[in-house]
Image: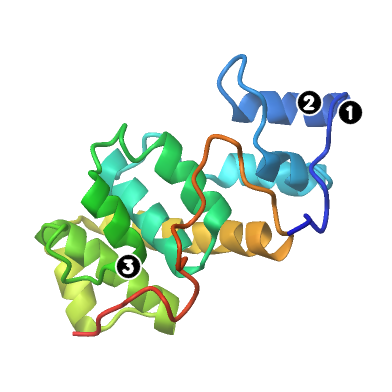
Amino acid sequence: MTPRIPALEPPYAPDVAEELAAMMPPGVPPLRLFRTLAHNPRVLRKIRHGNLLDRGSLARRDRELVILRTTARCGCAYEWGVHAAYFARRVGLEEAQLRATLHGGAGDPAFDERERALVRLCDELHDTAQLSEAAYEAVSSHFAPEQIVELLVLAGFYHAISFVANGLRVAPEAFAPGLPAGGARRGVVHSERH
């Protein structure tokens, strides 16, 4: 599909160039998503300052599992692919776990008890915009209150990122896989209700 708003190409306006440079490691060109957001420098700046990829209260593996499951549930091939390609292996997610973010449920054997609680959190927030008592109890048995707050905000943030990437049809990055055959569009990803 053709992007609805093409990503900006260099040379960038000085303020945009500064924001894009701050979002990427030195020498790495900015992602298409960021270059698309750069059509509105204020939004780009807010996204940069509001992202949760820093060393917050969550372990990187937990953070990535929430991002992968949330973007899979949103059918966001762009963002799922970026995180699958760049972060999944770095945080120790195995191939079976990566596949399970797309097609598994909260009871998938690829996940341990803690990870199942995270998948259930993502699924319930996606399906109902709330957490059942059982889901909250499962999450709170593994995570402190400050972490639970961060988990909820993280899932919401990546819903917003998915809306932008899907709504504007951001073209995939060359290094990132798309969703596997069959995709993970809404209704295709299996979620389990307990």
What's the distance in space between the residues labelled 2 and 3, CA to CA?
Answer: 38 Å
The residue tagged with tag 3: helix, strand or loop?
helix
Observer-nearest of 150 and 111 = 111
Q: Residue at x 75, y 39 (%)?
A: 35
Of the numbered discs 2 and 3, the one sitting upstream in the chain is 2
Mark 1 and mark 2 residues within 8 Å of each other at the beta carbon: yes
Q: Is residue 43 above or below residue 184?
A: above
Q: Residue at x 36, y 63 (%)?
A: 102
Classify residue 89 as left or right of residue 20.
left
Q: Amino acid at mark 1?
A: Ala
Locate residue 191: give its quadrant: bottom left
What's the distance in space between the residues labelled 1 and 3, CA to CA?
Answer: 42 Å
Q: Amino acid at mark 2?
A: Ala
Residue 52 in sight: no
Observer-nearest of 160 and 73 = 73
Classify residue 138 as left or right of residue 171.
left
The residue tagged with tag 2: helix, strand or loop?
helix
**Residue with the mark numbered 3:** 103
Q: Position of residue 136 (x, y in %)?
A: 23, 74
| Quarter in which the C terminus is drawn | bottom left
Q: Nearer the viewer, mark 2 or mark 3?
A: 3
**Residue with the mark numbered 1:** 13
Classify residue 88 as left or right of residue 180.
left
**Residue with the mark numbered 2:** 17
Q: Amino acid at mark 3?
A: His
Q: Nearer the viewer, mark 1 or mark 3?
A: 3
Q: Residue at x 66, y 24 (%)?
A: 29
